[in-house]
Amino acid sequence: QVQLQESGPGLVKPSQTLSLTCSVSGGSISSATYYWTWIRQPAGRGLEWVGHMYTSGSTKYNPSLKTRVTMSIDTSKNQFSLKLSSVTAADTAIYYCARAPRGDSEKLDYWGQGTQVTVSS
Amino acid sequence: QSVLTQPPSASGTPGQRVTISCSGSSSNIGSNYVYWYQQVPGTAPKLLIYRNNQRPSGVPDRFSGSQSGTSASLAISGLRSEDEADYYCAAWDDSLSASVVFGGGTKLTVL
């Protein structure tokens, strides 16, 4: 059974960079058949797709975040990561990592439990 | 403002059939598959329907999806108290800013 677990600081200061990691167990992140995805959800609001990356390193980001987002993958640790720069209070949200089959990027079949990130001084 | 439009709320009594709509455009629902997610408050979303009308293993056949033109619907028959949750539709959007887009979510209340 595949499991995903987010980790990272729960509090980030405005203008700084948010950094999160998703650890994958029960399957290899090196598999060429999945997109590794980040989704976020502000309190009381809907879901927002942040972006995804493929094992090869290719990425696709939400256009509204594209200039501030960087995703990377560490196959040796079976982890993938998200960096969001120049954060503001609007970036306060629960951040989820998830997996989607290649060719079906909307089919998020496994999710992490989510981690709350608050942007505040 | 979400790219896909859902009603903010829906309700029904146990045993009833309810439907939740999702409206989009030619660049998303009109040309790509629709996906549905169920989110019980305080938990991560769960995939409910994929590729318009396919159910992952373990999802009861009380849940069904359909798509027509630029709109889609999720139907829940034999409503149960545990179906009370938020429901989100999603699709790929082929516009210049190609990405996955979600609806704003519909809160389903079982009366």
Image: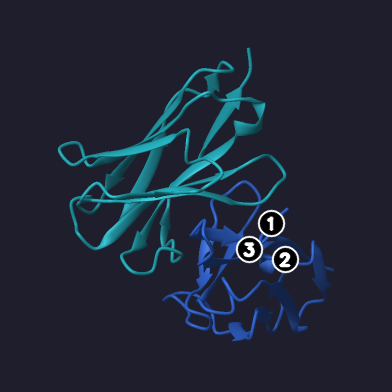
Q: Residue at x 60, y 85 (%)?
A: B66
Q: Of all residues shown, which one is farthest toward the front? A: B96
Instruction: Please tell me the colour of chain A.
Output: cyan
Q: Which mark is residue B2?
A: 1
Q: Nearer the viewer, residue A39 or A64?
A: A64
Query: Mark 1: few, some, or many residues within 10 Å (few <14, many ≥20)?
Result: some
Q: Chain of mark 2?
A: B
Residue type pointed to by label 1: Ser
Q: Which mark is residue B5?
A: 2
Q: Residue at x 72, y 66 (%)?
A: B5
Q: Is residue A32 left or right of residue B33?
A: left
Q: Residue B64's quadrant in the figure?
A: bottom right
Instruction: Please tell me the colour of chain B.
Output: blue
Q: Of all residues shown, which one is farthest toward the top? A: A121
Residue type pointed to by label 3: Tyr
Indicate which label's residue lies in the foreground, 2 or 3.
Answer: 2
Q: Quadrant of the C terminus of chain B?
A: bottom right
The image shows residue B24 at horizontal and vertical percentages of 66, 71
The image shows residue A7 at horizontal and vertical percentages of 40, 31
Q: Residue at x 52, y 47 (%)?
A: A63
Q: Earlier in the sequence, mark 2 or mark 3?
A: 2
CB-based contact (under 8 Å), mark 1 and mark 3:
no
Residue type pointed to by label 2: Thr
State the residue position of label 3.
Answer: B88
The image shows residue B84 at horizontal and vertical percentages of 71, 64
Q: Earlier in the sequence, mark 1 or mark 3?
A: 1
CB-based contact (under 8 Å), mark 2 and mark 3:
no
Let me know if residue A1 appears in the view: no
Circle 2: element type: loop
Instruction: Please determine whether, in this image, residue B54 is positioned above or below residue B48.
Output: below
